Amino acid sequence: MIVLPDNVQKIIQTLAAAGYEAFIVGGCVRDVLRGVTPADWDIATDAKPLQVKGLFSRTVDTGIKHGTVTVLINKQPYEVTTYRIDGEYADGRRPVQVSFSASLEEDLSRRDFTMNAIAYNSEAGFVDPFGGRKDITAGLIRCVGQAAHRFEEDALRMLRAVRFAAVTGYRVDEEILRAISGLGHTIAKVSPERIREEMCKLVLATHPQAVWLLESTGLLPHIFGEEYALPALAAEWLRQCPKEEPMRLALLLIGTENMLQNLRYDNKTINETTLYVRLLGRPLPASRYEIKKNLRYVPPEIFGKFLVLKEIAAPGEAQAIEKTSQELADIVANGECYSLKTLAITGKDLASMGIPPGEKMGEMLESLLDRVMESPGLNMRDILCGMVSRDLL
């Protein structure tokens, strides 16, 4: 039995009172059966979209062409979708057309995995024609129907299978693994954005050992490129890493060039991940001065996270990493200068001393900063002005 939220129950009862079937379906049923609170409650019904709209005072036509109407109850959105049958998947990504159906089982039969093909309402109980509840109990990810057929319809389902394994810790059915091995190249039909969304969920999941399914099935080269090789300790590294996408991506890409542009990652994620990858490819700073040289281009927060990654990837250097981390904290706490912004002398000061703006002024400021990073006590305006005056004599 599932205790439905009041708003969800109200939608189902309103549809039922008008003579229609209505069930919660898909991910929300799966999550409840797994003991996880659903993020969304999706409802399927035999009512057509216009009939749904006629029963509720506030609706939004979010996907009415494909049968989806968003019903607003107390300002909360709930997607209500008409039972449907998908037409032919001509491009391996989406059906050319969909047809509305009066059959819940037909609607469930088009779904990807058995655990996502379960419906429920308070009157009928569970409707589970493909054994999804049994598979959830067994911890098994299995396709509705033939795996190869499901993946030929939509190639992204191959990556979704691995992502669900990473999220749930479930075992992936052997038929699925064989199908991915034979059809991995078809992921090229899927948009980079859809692949990126799945990879994000996979990388941040709580069972990162599933990442090796991408490798063992041969799917990974079709995502990151033929030259990519998964680090041998990738799963263990991800387990130890905080759940921050750029940090985890850096551990997957360690020792390689950044491959995120092709998946249309945002610039912030690309830039942060690239910084981690580059830093991981270099020796640790050997001195306090070297730390400051890094801080010229890497914010302290990012440098601190790099040290976390470094300890994960190079546990043998733990003592040196701890020393670097303590020195970083000390530099920040003492407000020591490592950028022109905190240098006690400015371009205006140099201009007042007869140095025109341009290359020479820039070189002088850089030289002063370098000396201050080595000797923090020099970062006083009078001292720096005196140093400039002596250099001009």
Image (spheres, rainbow, N blue to C red):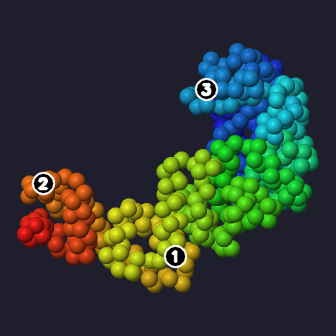
Name the disc covering residue 72, or none: 3
Three-letter residue code for mark 2: Ala
Mark 3 or mark 1: which comes first in sequence? Answer: 3
Tell me if label 2 and label 1 are in contact, CB under 8 Å: no
Q: Secondary structure at mark 3?
A: strand
Q: Foreground residue, 141 or 156?
A: 156
Mark 2 or mark 1: which comes first in sequence? Answer: 1
Q: Rounded to the nearest whole Å, what is the CA distance between mark 3 and mark 1?
A: 49 Å
Which residue is at a point 79% across and 65% down the rendered structure image?
Answer: 216
Q: Determine whether, in the image, residue 249 is placed left or right of residue 137.
A: left
Closer to the eye: label 2 or 3: 2
* Quadrant in which residue 232 is drawn: bottom right
Name the disc covering residue 351, or none: 2
Residue 29, horizontal then vertical, whole percent: 75, 44
Residue 369, horizontal then vertical, whole percent: 24, 67
Name the disc covering residue 311, or none: 1
Q: Secondary structure at mark 1?
A: helix
Residue 267, horizontal then vertical, whole percent: 50, 49
* Quadrant in which residue 380 is drawn: bottom left
Mark 2 or mark 3: which comes first in sequence? Answer: 3
